[in-house]
Image: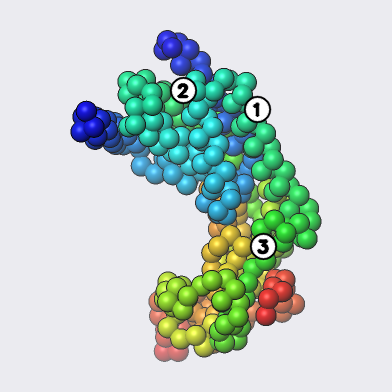
Amino acid sequence: MEMQVLLMVAVRAAIVYAFLFVVVRLLGKRKLGSHSALSLVIAILLADLASQAIFGTVSIGYALVAVSIVAAMYFIGDFFSYRHPRLQQLMIDEPRTLIRDGEILQHELAAERISTMELWSMLRQHGVDDLSEVKLAVMEPSGHLTVIRQEWAREALKSDLQMMRRDEA
Amino acid sequence: MSMVILLVRILVSVGFLWFIVRISGKHALGDAHPLDFIVAILLANLTKYMLLGQVSLPEGLVAIGLLGWMHMFVHLLSQRSPALQKRFWGDPVLLVRDGRLQRTTLARARITYAQFDSMLRGAGIERLSDVQEMRLESDGKVSIIRREGTRPLANLHLLDKPENPREEGPWSHAA
């Protein structure tokens, strides 16, 4: 009896894994995960539903139907928001510029509910301790800050050295 | 339970989850701060219970709505007041200053020397003297400001930086 239960768990786990594999593949590359807050929560939700199917706390058919419908809803929302920019604005948060040309845009900061301290903490993680170096800092839908430095603060490239050598010649 | 009821439950619960996530903002849910991540998992978990009919729809809506709203409120408060910001999320901790390891703060942050070395290597730094400031930020990630001479070359066309007053971030209390 005990062995039978363990065997059932193993079988269900294998089925659920195969099913999740197919569903996530169908959703496409990089769709689930930390691309946006919603996709992160949906990914966790799918995992959560799957875990119930594995331990049989709901019937496996029932849980897999639920996984399919949630994934389908996500797919449909994604599909239509890709087609219609208006819908996309409603569905997904747009990136928001927080710093432009070394100047912190305070009202944008307030709109994202990010404090100045948090902003500096994120800037330091990009190795920035001087605001004038920042040309553009954008809060992305994933909740991460991206930083574009001013031309003079960017790393020198091979082409810069080549140009210097040409100037010398 | 029939499939139609399941479909209705999914529509309501996932729709409400989307609404809460959408109004929470990019920064409040995600992998930035451990609490944000945990709340994201918690919201997904509550949605699952509601979706599978293990709790009633009103119960689920109240739980998800309240949790989402509270988390948003905490972020709103900490945005408004630097004091609350520190109280809620903690202060950034200075681990290195001017190339010197701050042993007491390292101990207080419970970071071993092995972990510290791996953080440096992760940033591609071989010598501690290359580091001007290294902080453990309140979101648990490490930030490193290199010493001026060890930073990558700035763009050679425009080596001269325009004359602007330097605007530095707030210092951490820990020294």
Residue type at mark 1: give it. Answer: Val
Please give the residue where the numbered disc 2 appears in the rendered image: B52
Secondary structure type for disc 1 = helix
Q: Nearer the viewer, residue A66 or A60?
A: A60
| Residue A45 - label | none
Q: Tags 1 and 3 in contact by the CB under 8 Å rule?
A: no
Q: Is residue A24 among the parts visible in the rendering?
A: yes
Cα separation, mark 1 vs mark 3, equals 30 Å
Q: Earlier in the sequence, mark 2 or mark 1?
A: 2
Q: Position of residue A167 (x, y in %)?
A: 46, 85
Q: Residue at x 59, y 37 (%)?
A: B21
Q: Position of residue A46 (x, y in %)?
A: 41, 34
Secondary structure type for disc 3 = loop
Q: Earlier in the sequence, mark 1 or mark 3?
A: 1
Please give the residue where the numbered disc 3 appears in the rendered image: B90
Q: Position of residue A92 (x, y in %)?
A: 56, 37
Q: Residues within 10 Å of mark 3 (few under 14, many from 20)?
A: few
Q: Residue at x 65, y 27 (%)?
A: B62
Please give the residue where the numbered disc 1 appears in the rendered image: B62
Residue type at mark 2: give it. Answer: Leu
Q: Residue at x 64, y 68 (%)?
A: B92
Cα separation, mark 2 vs mark 3, equals 38 Å
Q: Is residue A136 left or right of residue B54?
A: right
Q: Tags 2 and 3 in contact by the CB under 8 Å rule?
A: no
Q: Position of residue B75 (x, y in %)?
A: 69, 48
